[in-house]
Amino acid sequence: MFESILIADDDPVSRRLLQVSLGNSGYRVAMAADGAAALRMLDERDCPRLAVLDWMMPEVDGVEVCRRIRKGAREPYIYIILLTAKGQKVEIIEGLEAGADDYIIKPFDLQELKARLRSGKRILELQEQLVTAREQLRLQATHDSLTGLFNRMAILEALDREVTRSNRENKPVAVIMADLDHFKDVNDTHGHQAGDAVLQETARRILASLRAYDSVGRYGGEEFLVVIPGSGLDAAAELAERLRQGVSAQAVCVDGAMISTTLSLGLAVSTGEINRPEQLLQQADEALYAAKGAGRNRVETVSRRELSSPPAALPQAR
Ligand code: GH3
Ligand code: MG
């Protein structure tokens, strides 16, 4: 890890010396003959994360390279060692304040440079662990651990975002509130773990029916919220019907038991007057309530006009 390194030095002899000795120490060495070339190379996606920059280079010097890299606050972090003939305290301070992590004074001892590079690698490794931990925390804070879907807070944020965007672009946005029917019976009959497995499979089926720019989250225990940007009533009703069928068409197999479940869905679409997230949520919730009241396993809108219902002979959820 972190075995590639950029050497920027305008002096071909010292460049070659570093290339050979660091190459012999196992580094993959990239070379730049001036600061501008170094900046270009450090701007690439898979650029080296370690850089040894000569202070004195024509046009863009090493300190300026540091400054520009740090200004971009770029990630991943690049660990920079300045190579300088200047040993004056003020100059060293200038280099560090420009964003260098370390410096080494020419003529330098190769063993010392290698030791300083090893400490740079340790810093990069720690930083990598921090980034990974931060990513994991972000994922935990926004996702439901059982289903892997957005959690309630994250799906509400997505709804806010999409409603704001749709108002700005004068486009509709649809919301579907979906709730498993008689889910308590699943737990009572098959146990809580089987219930969890049904929730996971339901989440998977819902997700599989959505487009990349639709969002879905676990809104409550066995309740899901789907946000469909750019969708009018007809398209959203079609999607809701697909979700309903996706869940009811096939029982979920858990430890050999076939568990049939159904989904009730409430649908709301933004209009000129209904264009706030809480209004859409309330309407979808009312529609869901209507779907439950009308016998479950169906899609309804707030107008209580039934959009779909199961075939007459569909078995009870259980
Ligand atoms: P309805 O058709 O009216 O929605 O009936 P229901 O039984 O689905 O609704 P109710 O609100 O009575 O019960 C919901 C059940 O969902 C009760 C609760 O224990 C269960 N539940 C909520 N979260 C989880 C979970 O994470 N895992 C499991 N296994 N069950 C859960
Ligand atoms: Mg329920």
Image: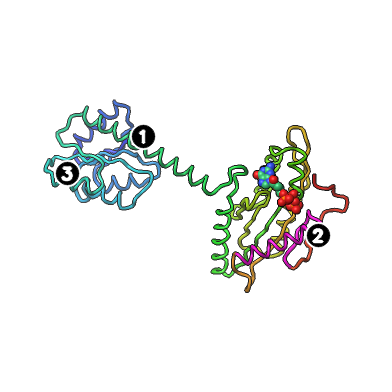
Residue 238 location (% of width, % of height): 73, 58
Principal secondary structure, stretch drawn in magenta:
helix
Residue in view at x 73 percent, y 32 percent:
255
Task: State how far apart marks 1 and 2 are (Cα).
Answer: 62 Å
- Residue placed at 74% from the left, 46% from the top? 184
Residue 18 in the image: state x and y as whole percent.
Answer: 23, 32
Q: Position of residue 149 (x, y in %)?
A: 60, 47
Residue 294 bears which disc, if any?
2
Q: Which secondary structure, mark 1?
A: loop
Cβ of mark 2 under 8 Å from ligand 1: the answer is: no
Three-letter code, disc 2: Ala
* Count of numbered circles on the image: 3
Quadrant holding the N terminus: top left
Residue that protrudes farthest toward the front in the picture: 188
Q: Which mark is residue 92?
A: 3
Amino acid carrying mark 1 in the image: Phe
Mark 3: amino acid: Ile
Question: Of residues 182 and 70, which is closer to you in this image?
Answer: 182
Q: Quick one: which residue is furthest to the left in this view?
A: 88
Could you tell me which secondary element the residue under label 3 belongs to? helix
Which residue is labeled 1 in the image? Answer: 2
Task: Give, as a single range, the part of the protein colored magenta.
Answer: 278-302
